[in-house]
Amino acid sequence: MYMIVGYSKVIITPNKPMTMSGYDNRHKMAKDVHDDLYARCLIIKINGDSVVMISLDLLGVDETLTNKIKDALINIDEKLTRKAIFVCATHTHSGPSNLFLNRDGYNIEYVDDIVSKCKLAFLDAEDDLKKSAVFFGYRNITGIGLKRNSPNIEKKNKYIKCYFLKIKRNGEDILLINFPCHMTVLDENNLYYSKDLIYGMELTFNDKGINKFLFMNGAAGDISTRYYKKESSFDEAERLGRSLAEQILDTDDEGLSEVYAEDIVAEEFALLLKYREALTEDEKKARVDALNKKLLLTDDYRQKRDIESSLMVLNRPNKKFEVIPDVIKLNGKYFKKIKIPLVIIGKLAYIGIPLEIYYSTGIKIQNIINKKFGVNHTFIFGYCGGYGGYMPPTKEFNQMTYEVVACPFERDSEDKLLEKLSEDRNEKMY
C-alpha cells in the first residue's frame, strides 16, 4: 500500500516581545526576531488512516497546549485518533516563555494563537497531500553534540546517531530529522527569537532546494553542543546547524531503505510517576553548601555553568503539585500521569516521550519497542505531548548533576518507564 504525505509550515513567532524561555537567570523580554519560529506539520496517510506530526519551535509543550491542538485537529477530521497525533517541541532556548498552564505569566492569548496556527498548518498539509515514496536512513553525526556531563571525554570519533525519513514525490524531497540535542548554542544573553542551530540547518537545506523539513528532537536529556560550540552566537548556531544538515545530506541514497506499510497502528502507554518530596530547609542548605564547595574546586567553565544552574534550581520555590496538569494524589503522595503515544508504520515505530530522557534511555526504549513489536527501528520523539522534566537513569543519582537536581521524580522513574513499555499488552494501564 502506497503512502500519501502532506507537509506545511506556519510562522508562530510572537508579534510582540515576551519573556524568553529556557534559562533561570534570564528574565528580560525579547528584543526582536533573528529568525522566525514555526509550526511544521507532516501528515502520513495509509488506506484512509493518518498519523500527524507537529513540530513547534518552542522550549516545550505542556499537556494543556497538546490537548488543545489535538482537539482542534480532530474537530477538523473526526477520523483522526489522539494516539496518532504527535505534538512536539524542538526545545529551542530562544523562544517565548509563558506557555505552561498555572505558571506565572501564562499567556493564554499566545497559546490560543499557537493552536490556531497548528490548525492552519494541518489544513495546508491536507491540501498538500500527494502519493509519496518514503525511505528510512541514519547517519552518525560528529562535531555537534555529546554527553554534557563528561568533562574529560575524548571527542575524537565520538558520534550521536541521527535518524531520518526522506520522502520523495514529484521531484521534491521532504525530510523528517530525528536528532537528540539541546538547542543551547545561544545562551541566556541572547534576547532575539531564534530556532538556534535549526536556523543553520534550514539555511543549508534551502540552499540545496529542500524547503520542506521537520525537526523532531530525541533523547536529548544529557546531550548538548557544550564541547563543540566555540561561542554563543548566531554565527556559531549557523555553523553547527549547517554542519548537521550537510552530514545528513551526505548520506548516500543507495543506503536508504524504502518503507512499506499496509496500515497505521496506534497505541498508547500510560503510567504514574511519583514526585520527589520537597527538600527541607536543612536538606536544601546541605546541597547548596556541597555545590558551592564543588564550584570552588573546578576551573572548567562548563562545569561551573552546570553547578551554577543546579544552584538556581535549588533556589526555585517548591512545586505546587495540585495545580500541575494530570497530577493525582494517592495516600498523601503526588503522582504525574504520563501518556506515551506509539505509532507503527511498517517496520518503523514512532514513540512520543513527554520528558527529558537521557540518550542511553532512548537506546533502551528502542531495544524494547523493536523487540516487542518486531520493528527495525523506533524513532524517539522527545519533548512530546507534555513537559514532565528530567528523567536521569537511577545510577546517575549518585552524583549531583544539574539533571539530577532538576529531576522532579523519584530515582526509580526510568525503571518504571522501561517496565511499563516492556509489559504485555493485556497488562492494566497503570
Image (tube, rainbow, N blue to C red):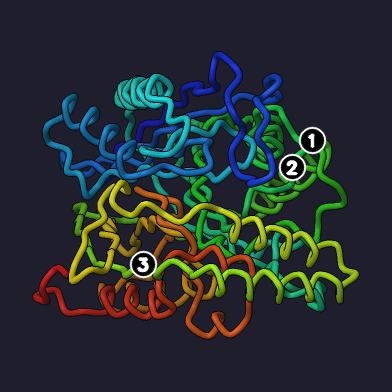
> Residue 264: percent from the left, percent from the top?
21, 52
- Is 189 left or right of 15, judged from the image as shown? right
Q: Gap between marks 1 and 2, in whole Å?
A: 7 Å
Q: Residue at x 53, y 34 (%)?
A: 97
Residue 196: quarter of image? top right
For mark 2, what is the residue?
Answer: 186
Q: Is residue 212 above or below residue 135?
A: above
Q: Alpha-carbon neighbours of circle 2 within 10 Å: few (<14), some, or many (≥20)?
A: many
Q: Secondary structure at mark 3?
A: loop
User: Residue 47, percent across and down?
Assistant: 16, 43
The structure residue drawn at horizontal position 32% and vertical position 28%, both measured from the top left corner, is 129
* Amino acid tagged 1: Phe
Please indicate, yes or no, whether residue 342 appears anywhere in the rendered image.
Answer: no
Residue type highlighted by circle 3: Tyr
Numbered mark located on residue 234 in the image: 1
Say which element carries label 1: helix
Q: Position of residue 115 (x, y in %)?
A: 34, 26
Q: Kindly report the distance in space between the C-alpha atoms of the residues bearing marks 3 and 1.
A: 38 Å
Residue on which the image places disc 3: 275
Q: Is residue 415 above or below residue 358?
A: below
At x 25% / y 40%, what residue is drawn?
45
Q: Nearer the viewer, residue 284 or 323?
A: 284
Q: Earlier in the sequence, mark 3 or mark 1?
A: 1
Label 2 residue SS: loop
